[in-house]
Amino acid sequence: MSEPPGAVTLAEAPPADPPPPRKLTAQRVQPLRRPGRWIATVVVLVLAAQFVHGLVTNPFYQWDRFGYWFLRPTILDGLLITLEVTAWSAVLGLLGGILLALARLSRSPVLRAASWTYVWALRSIPLIVVLLFLYNFSALYKTLSVGVPFGPAFLTFDESRLATDMAIAVIGLSLNEAAYAAEVVRGGILSVDQGQHEAASALGLPKGYQFRRIVFPLALRSITPNYVNQLIGLIKSTSLVFYVSLLDLFGTAQSMGSTYPGDIVPLLLVVTVWYLILTSLVSVVQFYVERYFARGATRSLPPTPLQKLRTGLRDLRERARREAAV
Amino acid sequence: MSAETAQTVVTTKAAGPVGPAEAPPAAVEVHGVHKWYGGHRVLDGVDLTVRPGEVTAVLGPSGSGKSTLLRVINHLEKPEIGYVSVNGEPIGVRRHGDRLRELSERAILAQRSRIGFVFQNFNLFPHLTVLDNVAAAPVATGRLSRPAARELAHELLDRVGLADKATAYPRQLSGGQQQRVAIARALALRPGVILFDEPTSALDPELVGEVLAVIRNLATSGTTLVIVTHEVGFAREVADRVVFIDGGRIVEQGPPAEVLDNPRHERTRDFLSKVL
């Protein structure tokens, strides 16, 4: 014979003043305990601390030598070359990419095929091969002329004067960049709703206006993150220009490393930190560019980090006030 | 042969009791238009005449070709056979002896800017403010200076009851408000004819009224309207003429009282019994 459990508890409960039952609706819901999360947090923090500790205390990194090299003029000259090559290739590559994307989306089968072939070829050939080809180009073709094939030439250039190391690097990277940018831009244009094209042509907006003011700005919203991805890849690819004897950031560090073999590790650290800084700057710019192109796409713009901090603090303060009231 | 019946209906209507509409050219004339999508025939010899100032409602089951007919009128769709003229001017083609030749894209765009089009899904430009949505086309087509276009845009927004939304972005508005902006955008080009492609089909029921009110207003102001719609009640109220399409052909047309209340064709009766 078993009594209902409720009766047992009642019988065993001390008869003295039972606590008054609290109204459920007056209480705050207890948050779910998450022990797994706490354990994971501890593990990650310990690992991170170990990594930082190793980084700081291991003599292998020679932080004093890092400090010596970080702002050396030779390194900064190399950094400048890296920036210059990146800037030119990013702009020329994007322009080339836009033209290739438009050709690929055009109604002309010849343009479509040419664009497809270009993208196919340049994506297949390793960048370093393209650069070395261009480097040896001036040996193969002494002069470069614009004219009718097999016919008269209108313009003739002396290749050796035209093909500086910088020009070779920029041309090689731009050719490569354009192939990838073409796909990024094409994807962006295809992502624009067909209704926008229809509305623009139903209003009779001129073709150029449709592209510049309607389709391209809308496409930029999806082009931006992809192109920034591409751009970050480009910043790092510029380290290959070392092989066409242009001393960029990486190239400078490399040549300094062969002069001071003991400093190779701190020099690599210098290069790493500079690339980290460049990438971070690009990411910050990306955030604001994306925010700009999000105009109208969402009901309200995503908050900037500063706005996020401010609302976060305000929420915290309000929460504290509420808790105090309860 | 059924195309033939449709044609006879048109001729009787055109010569019908309304009388003195002979002198000015028709606002819209559809001449024997055929249209295929691949092997599927969407329009099968459509002839239609819309007189200036007339409000025409086009009804029909989904897939009957009514939207395609509307899109053929402003040449968003090219007809395979036949052509359309608006205010006497062939659209998208020009006569060359006894042949029709395709016009250049630039010429077609210029023609479209004289025909208003309102989409089911509004298709406002999301990255432009409401004001810029309305003011863009008159500036881009070189008709108005920027300040003049903005002034006109303010005026038109006021007319559709959205004067206070000029600086908002389209996605910040309700569907009904967006559609009213889209109507203002179409009006900014001062079109002779405005085509409405199911203007209330994407709206929540309680927002339909505000859009219909704007269209009703246009109808009474003497603008030529062609409205593809499912709102039979609205068609009865504002339309001078109802056109019923099925299977890519005009089955029946006439004043709403005739077509809606006393349909002669089995298919029209069948359709109306389903939607009413």
Image: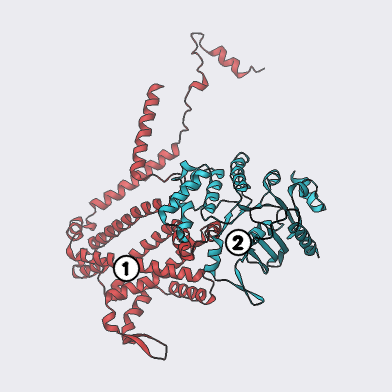
Chain colours: A red, B cyan
Badge 1 element: helix
Circle 1 crowding by C-alpha within 10 Å: few under 14, some 14–19, many from 20: some
Q: Which mark is residue B74?
A: 2
Q: Is residue A176 above or below residue B190?
A: below
Query: Of residues A212 and A28, which is closer to you in this image?
Result: A212
Q: Residue at x 46, y 33 (%)?
A: A33
Quadrant hosting residue A74: bottom left
Quadrant hosting residue B212: top right
Left/right placement of residue A171 relative to residue B259 reads left
Left/right placement of residue A158 relative to residue A40 reads left
Q: Position of residue B52 (x, y in %)?
A: 64, 56
Using the image, name the chain to which the residue with label 2 belongs: B
Q: Which mark is residue A88?
A: 1
Nearest-to-viewer mark from 2 and 1? 2
Give the CA separation, mark 2 to mark 1.
Answer: 45 Å
Q: Is residue A72 above or below residue B213?
A: below
Q: Residue at x 78, y 51 (%)?
A: B268
Q: Residue at x 61, y 38 (%)?
A: B206
Residue B139 shows up from this direction: yes
